[in-house]
Amino acid sequence: MSPVLSIALKDLRLMLRDRPGLLFTVLFPLLFGLFFGAIYADSATGERRPLAVALTVEAAEDPGWAEDFARALESNPRLDVRRLPDPGATDGALRSGAVLAELRVPAEFGEWFEAVGMRERGAPVLRFGPGALAETELLRGLVSGALHETLLRSFSERDATERRRRALLDLADEASTPASEALSLRGAAAAIQSLRGNAEGDRVAGLAIEVREGSLEPGAGRPRNSFAITFPQAIMWAVLGCAATFAVSLVGERATGTLTRLRLMPIRSAQILAGKGLACASVSFCVSLAFVGLGHGFFGVRPVSYPVLVLALVVVSFAFAGLMMLLAVLGRSKTSPGQLAWGVILIMAITGGGMLPLFFMPDWLVGISHFSPVKWGIFAIEAGIWREATPGDLMLSLGVLLTIGCGGFVVGAKAFVLSERFAND
Amino acid sequence: MLTIRDVHKSYGDVQALRGVTLECARGEILALLGPNGAGKSTTVGVATGLLAPDSGSVELLGVGSPRLARVRRHLGVAPQSIAVYEDLSAAENLRFFGRMYRLPASVLRDREAMLLDRVGLTHRAGDPVQHYSGGMKRRLNLAIALIHDPEVVLLDEPTAGVDPQSRNAILELVRELGDEGKAVVYSTHYMEEAQRISDRVAILDHGRVMATGAVDELISAHGGDTRVRRDSPAGTETVQTKDPLPTLAGMLAEPETLAIHVDRPDLEAVFLNLTGRSLRDT
């Protein structure tokens, strides 16, 4: 058996017997992935918990339009509309956070609606509770959307359109209406009349205003769920943990004298480092595969391409094993390589999206992330899990990682040979 | 087998070795005797190739310097620190280091069993080394140095910190290695060990070889006279002589002799006469 393989197997055996280290390398990244996956469950796929809104519809002679509007609100899955049994309890519900906002539909809403909002009184009123901070604009949009939906639908009903036309004319005839405004109202009434021109039956052709959704080709992938986002991060943390563990193990060998013993063997110093690098890469790859299996089996993480994912895991494992070799030989004291390794790893993780996904970060930090191998590692893994990256994007990330791995091996091996040459001199 | 020729080695301003010249032949046990800081470990470091000398040369088996990987194949070293993997068992340690020498599996298996038996660790071969006593770890440390059956063996204070039973076992094993025809260099600051097992002793002090030779030769040349003391009611009479037997006979014939003490010179006396200091005082 080659010395490199023997050293790798020895390190694997030692790692398996280091229970606390194993927990940190395997369990911590897994908990990281599961914890943040649960937290981001709503944000990842755009699905949010419905926003709770209290709806108060004041009694009116003809509640038709108010009820139409209420039905439009209630049919929106992003709203949790509650008609509180005691309207007087609304303030309490707002203050306690039971509801985010209150929408009050006045008794004059019907007249206001038929006048296309031209009347002073009757507009719906939205009140926000103290807990609604980020949701205010979203609520405004959803309520306005329901209002416009109701309005558009109303134009497709003959009787409603006629009533609207009459309402506008009545408003224009009122003594309090200024002459210029009366002119506009009569013009609007005439426009509604022309919309009725092609009517068949009781319904006219409505205004069809649609927002269509397009798709991005290629790369149309979206994460299936939040765990599809956090598992690549968890895998990355497992790889980082392995790298740090093996970097520190070299320090341990130096301290116990086994490194000296290895240097007395008929093998080269570079072979010692290569053996440790092989062990590191092997563990990284195996733990990563285990995470993929766990994600697939229990958390709905379905890779879009297994070949791409396996390739990504191989390259990521290689890259960070190479990085480990460089970190392991830096520093001369017993503790500094370990501290240095973790310091570098944490910076790479924070700037590369290992803590929070990059899409949560400000632009300047996204710019910095290009220099972090963690960013490229996560991208490569995501490419196999959900991202459906283009071949060009994938090759770029793999190329960067391979360069880091090779550079780490070469520079680390040279530095190791030099450091051992001077270790005892 | 091992030739160290006029080696100088400095650590900054400190001259650790000043022109050390030593030879160790096949089947010979050469003890490096000296106090702490004498240069024993540095000599071992240079001899193993871990340290590069500032000047001078080291040659192994007439093949080359131990700084070459292919030459180190013939060298077995037990370092002063116990260099074993404590999370592995004795058997696993031996197997791993044996693989570094690319020993065939069957050969490795046989040597592993033989060495475990020889150092008395067969009954604990499967236990993690962290559960061993200091003496057991030292014996394993030595066994690892022998896994590949080297021709030259360097032992750097192999009995440091061990119990008397383990020390005895190690010294017996070292003697056997010499009998098997290996060249053994044994570094120690225990005079008793050097006297007990070595064929020749090299006395080091402040990086220099003060004297080299068989124990009897060194004592005869540098140990001084034998002291014979006679205790009587009148007091103590001391005679220093190179030939104690006639003096002893004369003292025994004296009346009212209470006791007679004979202090033969030893390596301690040799060191004292050569350096002006006691081996134990440094």
Image (tube, rainbow, N blue to C red):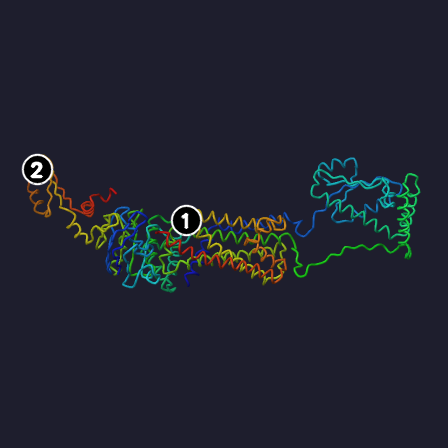
Point out which mark residue B256 bears: 2
- Disc 2 marks a residue whose amino acid type is Glu
Question: B221 and B105: which one is in front?
Answer: B221
Residue A101 lies in quadrant: top right
Instruction: Determine the image quadrant of residue A140.
Output: top right
Locate the N terminus of chain B and report the quarter of the image it occupies. bottom left
Q: Is A289 placed above or below A331 here?
A: below
Which chain does the numbered disc 1 sit on?
Answer: A
**Which residue is at a point 34% across and 55% down the rendered structure image?**
B50
For the C terminus of chain B, the quadrant is top left
From the viewer's side, name the closer residue of A127 and A169.
Answer: A169
Label 1 and label 2 in one chain: no
Which of the numbered marks, if any, corresponds to residue A332? 1
Residue A418 x %, y %: 40, 55
Q: Residue furthest front?
A: A180
Query: Alpha carbon of mark 1 to alpha carbon of mark 2: how far?
Result: 70 Å
Secondary structure under the numbered disc 2 in the rendered image:
loop
Please state which of the two labelled residues, at mark 1 or mark 2, is closer to the viewer: 1
> Mark 1 belongs to which amino acid?
Arg
